[in-house]
Image: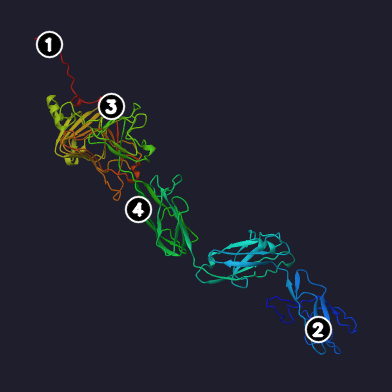
Amino acid sequence: MYEDINGNGVYDGPGPEGYNGAQIILNETTNTGLPVSTPQNTSNLGGNWGFGLYEGSYIHATYSNYTNVSVSLTISTIPAGYVLSPSSPVSVTVNPSVDTRVDWKLVRTAPKGFHDNSDCSVSGGWTCDPDNYSQALDVHFYDGPGFTTFIGAVTANQTREPAVGAECGGNSNHGFTFTTPASVKDGTNHSIYAYPINIGAGAGYNPLLGGSPRSISCSITNTISGSVFVDANGDGRKNVGESNYTGAITITSSGTGDIGTYPSPGSFLISNAQPGLRTISYGNLPAGYRLTYPINGPPPSFRVRVGPSCDNGGSLDAICSGGNITNLNFGITINASPWIQATGGNIRIDSGINDQIPSNADPLCGGAYMSLPGNGGQPGIVHSGARSASFGNGQASANPYNWVVSAPDGQKYTPPTPNTVRTSYNYLLSNASQLALTINDLTAQCSGGLSNCNLSANIPTGVYKADGNVTLTNANYTFPASRNIVILVNGNLTFGGKVHVPSGSTAMFSVSGDIHVDKGVGEATNTSSLSDLEGIFSADKNFIVEGNNSCSVGVDLRLNIAGNVISNAAYGGGSFVNQRNLCLGNICPSVSFTQRLDLIINLPPLLRAPNYIWKEVAP
């Protein structure tokens, strides 16, 4: 009697496999008249037993005078946790001088079940233990034979088909699914061994499941996931409150065999990605949007590596974990154009209002309106001459006002004196002569000359004239208090820095050519309303706000003007030219105007319209 420890199904001779202590009873079924044999115990000779003479390495039964004697051999004591193979009793026939051998194999009671399958995703099957069909078994998995490389375990508690229930005492909840680990996905062959963990009397004996092992050969695969999101603040990161773009997106990968899916609006998942480099591209930027991140292409792309040495390609949000990449996000925002805005005062553009206000205009900048309420609590009126007005995705001013004058009711401005605007260079120069005002040479107030004029910090009240182009180079100039200054420039005027006019003073600039504002004058923060230029500015030709006007070159500064701006004052042709582009910051105006009523109240006589009192006198 032996225990088949090595599982080869045969008795390997005396030694560890022999089982000592079992009792064997012989019953003669052929009546020979011989005395009944005494029950024999397996001996310490490695589980040997016998009836008759001891010969060699085992005991045998000899019937020297009888032929074809039938006997029955019964095991009376079977160790707990075992079953016999063959079962007891066993019938044999003995003959004279012939050794009749019977080997019993002790087999531990064990779980039953089957290892159905293994692939690069999962291993599946079922198992249960006859000792307790209501208890779910653990199943241990090894890579290769010999219990050397443990790769994981699961509990067999999943519901299977009725046939499993029929094998497991009516309980079908003995199925298992084991996820194939990355450790065996190396492109080589692996044998997956499944062992149910024995319970009850057979505890400690964990036989290999039927159908096991299963062979697999899997390459390592990884995933890449991310989104296309609306980057409201334009910083390239997907921040709290920023949502995915809900329209259709197209994401492509240069990886061979990569599989792309879209689990939810604006999100993507690339699976089956073999280790290595690949390019992930976003191919269908929607109309009316621009990219905020990454700024490359077209098409905008990330160059990433999955698997060992995972690399997110420098993405701001992406994370490498276990060779996979998550949060590989593409940022887009509404493609807003530069626009202007006024607070408190009226706006008039006779060539037609075309202010492309974005729908996502920042509330910190007053929202999607061209005109905001001033100190009086109401917005100004927007005049579009005889042409229609366009406000993009905004409107003239907030409801219930929304005051706009345009076609078909609007008309071009007609000055009281035909073709003469009272802020033009020639008009003011002529008016100063008529009023016999002293016209001072501006050169005396400019250190560095007119082309590099550093304006005096204590310029007196008066009218000043410059013949030739003037560039004011003061970085941040403030006129003295209680002064009324008129500067007439027979040429072009450029502001190279900020200019401020304190309350109680007035500054007027009237230019026969163009007024330029250097691109370095302004605010870096697109929501800032701090004034940069203060005064009354009149150009007979163009008022030009200089800038890069190209996001590929750089984002421009926002310019804030407090006062009044007049262009085409000589009616010879000219306009307001805005070259400032805040790019992603175009959710705010690139140029803003704020009403300064004090400048009007404090106008010097040169700028005031004369009042005439007519009285008829009898001759």
Q: Earlier in the sequence, mark 4 or mark 3?
A: 4
Q: Position of residue 532 (x, y in %)?
A: 29, 37
Residue that numbered label 1 is attached to: 617
Which residue is at a point 58% across and 67% down the rendered structure image? 117
Q: Residue furthest top?
A: 618
Residue that numbered label 2 is attached to: 93
**C-alpha gap between disc 2 and disc 4:** 93 Å
Where 488 falls versus 130 (above or below)? above
Q: Position of residue 289 (x, y in %)?
A: 35, 47
Looking at this view, is 260 or 481 the one in front?
260
Say what secondary structure mark 1 lies in: loop
Q: Quadrant of residue 59?
A: bottom right
Residue that numbered label 4 is attached to: 295
Comparing marks 1 and 3, which lies closer to the viewer?
1
On the question of residue 423 being in view, the answer is yes
**C-alpha gap between disc 1 and disc 2:** 165 Å
Q: Are marks 4 and 3 in contact (CB under 8 Å)?
A: no
**C-alpha gap between disc 4 and disc 3:** 46 Å
Q: Quadrant of residue 275?
A: bottom left
Say what secondary structure mark 3 lies in: helix
Residue that numbered label 3 is attached to: 598
* Quadrant of the snapshot with the N terminus: bottom right
Q: Earlier in the sequence, mark 1 or mark 2?
A: 2
**C-alpha gap between disc 4 and disc 1:** 78 Å
Looking at this view, is 333 or 234 the one in front?
333
In the image, 240: left or right of 495? right
Q: Are marks 2 and 3 in contact (CB under 8 Å)?
A: no
Comparing marks 2 and 3, which lies closer to the viewer?
2
